[in-house]
Amino acid sequence: MATTETIAGFVQAVEFDEFGDQVVEELKKRVLDSVGIGVGALGEPPVEVVAETVSDVSSDGSCTLWGRELTASPSQAAMHNTALTRYLDYMDSFLAPGETPHPSDNIASVIACGEREDATGKDLIEAVGVSYELQGELAWNAPVRDKGWDHVTHTVLSAAAGSGAILGLDHEQLRNAVGIAGTAHNALRVTRTGGINEWKGMASANAARNGVYSCLLAENGMEGPVNLFEGQKGWKHIISDEFDVELDPGCEHVFDTMTKRYVAETYAQSAVEGIIELAEMHDLDHDQVESIHLDTFHGAKLIIGGGEGDRHEVETKAQADHSLPYMLAAALIDREMTNDAYDPERIQRDDVQSLLRKVTVEEDPDLTDRFESGEMPANLTITLTDGTSHEVLKDDFQGHPNNPMDWEQVEEKFEIMTRDRYDESRRNEIIETVRNLEHYEVSDLVDLLN
């Protein structure tokens, strides 16, 4: 059943020593991936707004603000550090038919609370597993997107559960924390529809902060609505419909989580990989492109293909990384999709602005069925001005659960994201610490991030 009692019992049942070796390995990969992405986001303007705000309201505390010689309270550190891991839209994603949240949105919260508690690396892996498992079950069984709620409505619950685990909350404190988090902090989907703005990349940081704060309130004795889900006017009545969860203490939902190969929205990954393959294989000249057509699945059409607002009007990064027309045009021209694609000057250049208007996106019900069966299909056709056409059919991409990245690929991504800030010695130290996290303390990792 889905109750605060069920969630609290699950959190207390999870034990690192009961995890399978591959679960531990995959959770470590997610930690390294998130840390690298976070470091790569330092200096981005919206992240700096969060840093300034966090400094204003929490000038000192027990938790490190990554990349800065500053500390803050656990909840404010969760806000800042989650803003880092989320802003570039390079984080991981959980692939469920009706919802695609980002479980890595929980990692910075757990690390902040672990630093406060002088926790071990085993404690950290265990708590990250808690968050991934709960977020996965909610995504599978209680999707909220079609009801107008943002997916970070799930994140505040999973962040509270993972943070509560590493804080060592007892059973009733966990129930209260989840009750507070799920009652007080539900986010509207308006942030991802119509004209998208920068809050899209910050909403999960706010959810992470609220999840941690709910735990701190519960730790200090605050009671919450422990009938959160089933109570009158509760979560099942207002946010979702009736649903159940089967929370596995082995935390194997991490296997259903993809790692992004490209700096692009989750549902764009296969299509971006496909268009880069075509561009390289046929040495395509973007000036000779007459049209680009993508057949895709429902979620991709809805979110980034024009189902929730025109995606051909692109002026900012927030709009660009949620526009299939922009991402496909930029990937064809540049033959890559890195953070450079979202530089303001790059977005405004005539080549990509002209080409993106030649992109059409349609939903194919067969591809929707395939997506719901565990693929991420994309059928892409490029037609040139001389009438020649080129087609690629993708089932998934490198980083999809059916085609996961290995350690070396995750390390390569980490190095690319951090090389401008850390020298080779520091990068290797961070990799070594995460690779063998069960033999380290949380503080050992955090100390390396300044």
Image (cartoon, rainbow, N blue to C red):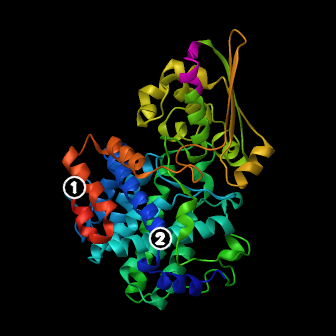
For this rendering, which residue is in front, 153 or 434? 434
Residue carrying label 2: 129
Name above or below for residue 32 compared with residue 121. Answer: above
Q: Quadrant of the C terminus?
A: bottom left
Q: Residue at x 49, y 43 (%)?
A: 261
Q: Tell me the CA gap for discs 2 and 1.
A: 25 Å
Q: Residues within 10 Å of mark 2 (few under 14, many from 20)?
A: many
Q: Quadrant of the N terminus?
A: bottom right
Q: Position of residue 251 (x, y in %)?
A: 52, 72
Name above or below for residue 363 compared with residue 15. Answer: above
For this rendering, which residue is in front, 243 or 77? 243
Q: Residue at x 43, y 49 (%)?
A: 87
- The answer to whether residue 372 is magenta is no
158 with respect to 2 (left or right):
left
Name above or below for residue 262 compared with residue 121. Answer: above
Q: Type of residue at label 2?
A: Gly
For this rendering, which residue is in front, 185 or 408? 408
The furthest residue to the top: 386
Residue 290 occupies which quadrant of the picture? top right
423 with respect to 403 (left or right):
left
Q: Residues within 10 Å of mark 1 (few under 14, many from 20)?
A: some
- Give the dominant element type of the magenta stretch: helix, strand or loop: helix
Q: Which residues are magenta?
A: 278-287
Q: Type of residue at label 1?
A: Asn
Residue 450 is labelled as: 1
Q: Position of residue 249 (x, y in %)?
A: 53, 78
